[in-house]
Structure formats: C-alpha cells, structure tokens
Amino acid sequence: MTKPIYILNGPNLNLLGEREPEVYGTDTLDDIRRALEAQAEGLGLTLVFRQTNAEGQLIDWVQEARDEGSGIIINPAGLTHSSVALLDALLAVDIPIIEVHLSNIHRRERFRRFSYVSRAAAGVICGLGARGYGLALEALADMVEKR
C-alpha cells in the first residue's frame, strides 16, 4: 500500500468559512478534509490532514512526511511569503509537493505575490478556492503512481 499523502495547512486556515469569506470562500477546513477523504478513497489513497498556526509544527510535519508520506499538498497560508525555514524543510524532502492557495495570490497585495514555497513545489494551484485541493490531490496521485 502507498504511504499516505500529507495535506498540511498553515496559520489561520482553521478559520476558513468565517474569515473573509469573500476572499477564501465559505467552505470550512473540515468541509475540505471530508471532500478530500472521499476523493482519496476513490483513488485508493490515504491522507494525513493537519492544520497548525505554528511555523515549527508545520516544519516538523514536513520532516515527518519525508519518511512517512508519498507526497505533500501544502497550503502554507501566510508563511508562504515569509518562511525560509519552511522552504528549507521542503527542499529536504524527496517526494512530490504541490502548493495550494484558495485565493489567487497574484491578484492580491504585492507582498502576497511572492512565494518561498514555490521553489520546492512541483506545481502550484491558486485562485480556485477549495476545488484547488481536489485538483492537487488528483495531480499528486498521478505523480506518486509514476514514481
């Protein structure tokens, strides 16, 4: 059996559905998790789905996925634009990584248009709301199968 796909979510994503729904949509993180679990089951995959507001915890999970996972889908949220430490952790991982953002970071404030994480990602999906996670899972399933 394939190792699980790690879906890692950064700061403030626990507030999805409440925080700025005009930007991030009305789906909660739990709604996204449930949809991905159903999709993963259809693909014959298992998931490890986590969220944290702490940068160090996110880095620890990336390092865990390095040995225990077959791929990572990451929405680093605000850490996207500021965390060299998260980039370093992702660069040390030899499994496929897809970066996801609910909003289109390129249509937002100037500081949100740069992503440290993109340098480590095989692909980036942004601006498609919660649907972006499902597209990332589909793409990552293909990548994992080809490995």
Image: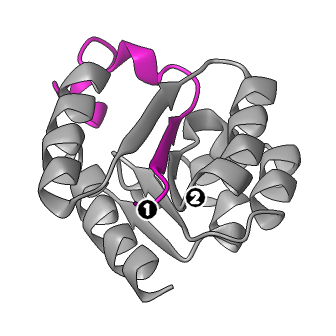
**Residue 69 visible in the current orientation:** yes
Residue 44 part of the magenta segment: no
Q: Residue at x 23, y 18 (%)?
A: 17
Residue 23: name its quadrant: top left
Counting residues from the start of the chain, the first of labels 2 and 1 encountered is: 1
Estimate how packed mark 2 is, as few (under 14), some (14 to 19) or many (20 or more) residues with alpha carbons within 10 Å.
few
Q: Which mark is residue 113?
A: 2
- Residue 145 horizontal/vertical position (percent): 38, 80
Q: Where is 122 relative to 34, above or below?
A: below
Q: Which residue is mark 1?
A: 2
- In terms of image quadrants, where is residue 136? bottom left
Please tell me how crowded label 1 is: few (under 14), some (14-19), or many (20+) other residues with Cα within 10 Å. few
Residue 39 in percent (x, y) is at 15, 51
Marks 2 and 1 sit apart, C-alpha to C-alpha, by 34 Å
Marks 2,1: beta carbons within 8 A: no
From this view, report whether residue 115 is shown above or below residue 18.
Answer: below
Looking at the figure, which quarter contains the N terminus? bottom left
Picture coordinates of residue 79 (x, y %)?
A: 68, 38
| Direction from residue 15 to residue 11 in the image, left or right | right
Does 17 lie within the magenta span?
Answer: yes
Residue at image position (33%, 79%) is 142
Which residue is located at x 63 percent, y 18 percent? Answer: 53
Q: Is residue 115 visible?
A: no
SS state under label 1: loop
In front: 64, or 52?
64
Q: Which one is nearer the viewer's eye here, 107 or 84? A: 84
The residue segment tinted magenta is 1-28
